[in-house]
Every structure is written in structure tokens, then in C-alpha cells.
Image (cartoon, rainbow, N blue to C red):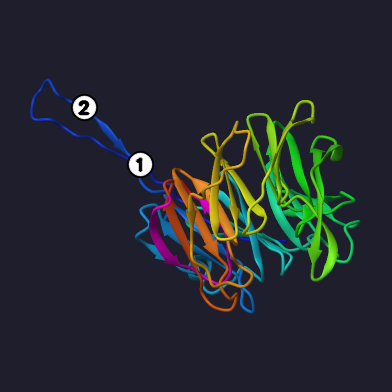
Amino acid sequence: MKLTKFLMGAFIGSILLSACSDDDDFTGEIDEPLGTYDNGFFVLNEGSQTAGTVTYVSQDLQTSEQAIYQFVNEGDDLGNYVQSIFFNDDLAYIISNGSNLITVVNRYTFELVGKVDSGLNVPRYGVVENGKAYVTNQADFSTNEDDYVAIINLETLQVEETVIIGDAVEFIEEEDGLLYIQNATYDTGNKVAVFNPTTNTVDNTIETYTYTGTLYGSPNEFGLNSFEIEDGFLYTLSGSYLEKFNLNSLELESSIPLAYEDGDAYNIDIEDNQIYFTVGTSVYRMGINAEEAPEEAVLTYNSNSAYGVMYGFEVEDNRIYIADGGDFGSDSFVEVYDLQGNLLNNITVGVGPNGFYFND
């Protein structure tokens, strides 16, 4: 663990506006930006032969800045294969699984606050609950039996405990004091673990749909690839099925088959009572209470990437965000669309863009 000292100023000013008339006195407050990177979003670029980077894009999509961490922190880098970001108040925690590192920065200035550089083994995703960070770690790729959750003290940035899950770990999400951990990676696996951070135990497990397909010419069991929690329900996407589970009973409430010529469905995201997912280079949308899969795509984008189609995907504030992995050796691009599928902008970012994180 390396903890650095930092100074962060948040200046909030007010401007008193005076009218010409004695009867019309009024005041108005204008909030000063919290930092250079306030009111925009970040694109996480995982990198390849070089360290990963973060691109900042302004909310109006007209300004972008590359490798902002390296710029602000005088050439220090984020490590290899930058995987994800999670937030807690004014801080951003940037996970680099290739370097077993979490870099902590002020989310508005990107000034370095500290680093977690021990107790991690292929860290993937994180979340904060009750003043501690919970980070999934995949450890040895040859087995899932050693996959664990690292529990990090946010004051000292030390891993204070590790909990073996006994199954694959990937995405993690907090809901009503419980942590939901995806026990599936790279299309393999079909469970979501319900982790209790009070006891640091897995209290329950939800099983999702699996199907048999072919991987590299051999039969393979394909399963869960993403999930979302909304209004007391867990929505899981398993390539060819969308399932809905009640979080109180953990029972399956509905299951909708998804069959598309262009392949399996990935990247579930729920926004404003609409479920979004991707198939190949297309984005589909359906109402949250729909009983059948949509037939028509909202949009289809152009990609020449062999392995990075829809490498990052998000729907936020009436916009659809798509990241294309490109060739994973040179800078690639992201595209932003409105909800009708109209392209708003194509923006050059770094190598292997894999996710969007919003700073509004």
C-alpha cells in the first residue's frame, strides 16, 4: 500500500445579482466546478502492450482529453490491463488486473490519493459498502476454487480480509445492504452469489440458464454474461435467455428467449424502465415488463474489430454509449447516440476502450 498526501479544494461561490429597482432585490448561486473533470464522463482504456489510460469527454461531447491520469500525475501510470472503476464520494478507484493494483484518485481532479498494491490477485470489479471496498479477484486462471473477494479498509488502503467464494467471480453490485456477485466469466458459469457483508459469507445462490454450444470446435456450456438489479428484481442475460428473479424470494418470475441471427445477447443495461442489450454490432431495447424479445434494433454501428465489438456499452441520461475495442494495439473509438439511434459523435480514445463512467 502506498498512501500519498493530497490537497483538494472545492470552491463553491455565490454571485449576488442586484436589480435596478429597490423592490427587485434577489440572489442567485452558481456552483463552481469541483475540478477539471467535473460534468463529463470517463472512458476506460484497458491498454495492451502499454499501460491503460483514461479519456475524459465533456458532457456536450465537444472536448476530450487523453491519458488524464498520466498528465495530472507527472507520468505515473495506472498499470496494465485497466479493468474497471468504482466510486465512493469524491474518490475514484481504478482497478488494473494486469498489475494487481488499485489506483485511488480524486474523481474531479484525478490527482493521486493512494494505491492498493498488495493483497490483490487479478482484481476485476469493486463496490463500497459500510465504509469498506469489496473487490472480486480471479486469482489462478486454471481454477475457480481460489477466486475471492478482497475486503479493503478505505482509511489505510490495506486489504484486511479475503473471503474465498469457491466459484468464479466477476461483476459485483450492492443492493439493500447485500452484495450480488456474478459467478460466471467469459460466458461460462450460471450463478449469482448473494454475499452478506455483515458476516462475510455467501447466504444464497441464484442459478441462471445455461445452454450447450461450441467453443473452438468443442462442446461448451455457455451461461451468464451480465446482470442488472432494478426495483427489487435481478435481471440476468445468458446469451439466449433473459431471466427475471425476485430478490425477496429468489424465485424465477419470468424467462424470455432471445434468438437473433447475428449471435448471442450481451451487455444488459436498464435505464428508465427500458431494458437494453447488444447483439453483434446492434443495440436492442424492450420495455421492462415486455413478454417477448424485440425484433428491430435501435441502431447498428460499423466495426472492423475481430474481438472488440461492443467492448463497452452503457445507457445513461438519454444517450447510448458504445466502445469498440479496435485492434487492441492502437487508439480506438467510442460512439454516442440518442435514444432514437442517431449518431451524436464519434470520439477517438485510447487502446481497448472497455467502459464508461459518469462524473455528473
Mark positioned earlier in the residue sequence (2 or 1):
2
Residue 130 in sight in this render:
no
Residue that protrudes farthest toward the left in the picture: 20
Which of 167 and 240 lies nearest the eye of the viewer? 240
Magenta extent: 341-358
The residue wearing badge 2 is 26
Q: Report the amino acid beneath label 1.
A: Asp
Q: CA distance from mark 2 to mark 1?
A: 17 Å
Q: Secondary structure at mark 1?
A: loop
Figure quadrant of residue 100: bottom right
Position in image of residue 279 (x %, y %): 60, 55
Residue 124 in sight in this render:
yes
Residue 259 bears which disc, if any?
A: none
Note whether 188 is above or below 181 in the view shown.
Answer: below
| Left or right of residue 2: residue 303 | left
Position in image of residue 210 (x %, y %): 81, 49
Figure quadrant of residue 146: bottom right
The residue wearing badge 1 is 31
